[in-house]
Image (cartoon, rainbow, N blue to C red):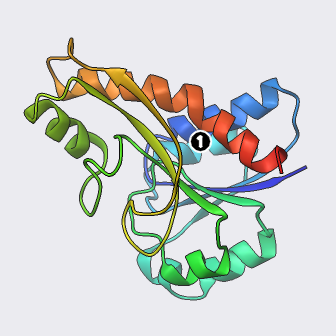
């Protein structure tokens, strides 16, 4: 059994999808969901699956409180699944090569501070990109600059709105993110 700490800020579709993937493969993992938004839908999704939830603010994240929570949980992997804040350097150093993120574009394009969610998709649309995709990468002290673990692309030539692009990207996220996590945890 592996322990996965999942950080999220919003709806939690990736968190839910990751847990569902392992449940369907009958791989029992222990999860902890950490959320920086007390109104996030991910809280309800986690609670429905009896997954413990920790809600925190910036002071708790950058102080010692979340560090203590993680030390007590002792995660095999920390997954940023729709987490919108910069991950603290102290935690990156405490868990080297154990913190991963999914980014809704083909890095290094459309990465960096402020480039998340619809902002990324709007930029892809504005630049008339023919394709976009996802990047799963290790987290370091800079936004979206950690080592790339996996990328997958898809055509977006048919997309006329950022919402269309978001749907294409979400399909890639749901298909590939759990598989990459599985490989990182069990193909050692």
Circle 1: is it few (<14), some (14-19), or many (20+) Cα within 10 Å?
A: many
Question: Could you tell whether 146 is left or right of 106 in the image?
Answer: right
Dot 1 falls on a residue whose secondary structure is helix
Q: Position of residue 54 (x, y in %)?
A: 62, 64
Total number of numbered discs in the rendering: 1
Q: Position of residue 125 (x, y in %)?
A: 14, 30
Q: Which residue is mark 1?
A: 15
Q: What residue lies at 78% left-to-right and 49% top-to-bottom?
A: 185
Of 124 and 91, which appears nearest the observer? 124
Q: Position of residue 157 (x, y in %)?
A: 20, 16
Q: Is residue 114 above or below residue 121?
A: below
Q: Is residue 139 above or below residue 63?
A: above
Q: Position of residue 150 (x, y in %)?
A: 54, 42
Question: Could you tell whether 105 is left or right of 83 in the image?
Answer: left
Q: What residue lies at 67% left-to-right and 34% top-to-bottom?
A: 179
Question: Could you tell whether 77 is left or right of 27 in the image?
Answer: left
Q: Is residue 127 above or below residue 61?
A: above
């Amino acid at each position: 059994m592996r322990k996965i700490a999942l950080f999220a800020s919003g709806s939690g579709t990736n968190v839910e999808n990751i847990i569902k993937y392992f449940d369907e493969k009958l791989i029992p993992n222990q999860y902890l969901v950490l959320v920086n938004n007390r109104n996030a839908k991910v809280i309800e999704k986690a609670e429905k699956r009896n997954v413990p939830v920790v809600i925190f603010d910036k002071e708790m994240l950058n102080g010692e409180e979340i560090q203590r929570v993680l030390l007590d949980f002792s995660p095999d992997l920390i997954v940023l699944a729709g987490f919108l804040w910069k991950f603290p350097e102290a935690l990156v150093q405490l868990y080297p090569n154990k913190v991963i993120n999914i980014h809704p574009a083909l890095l290094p394009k459309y990465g960096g501070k402020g480039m998340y969610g619809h902002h990324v998709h709007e930029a892809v649309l504005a630049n008339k990109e023919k394709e976009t995709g996802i990047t799963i990468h290790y987290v370091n002290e800079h936004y979206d600059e950690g080592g790339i673990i996996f990328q997958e692309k898809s055509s977006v030539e048919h997309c006329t709105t950022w919402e269309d692009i978001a749907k294409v990207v979400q399909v890639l996220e749901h298909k590939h993110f759990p598989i990459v996590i599985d490989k990182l945890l069990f193909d050692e």
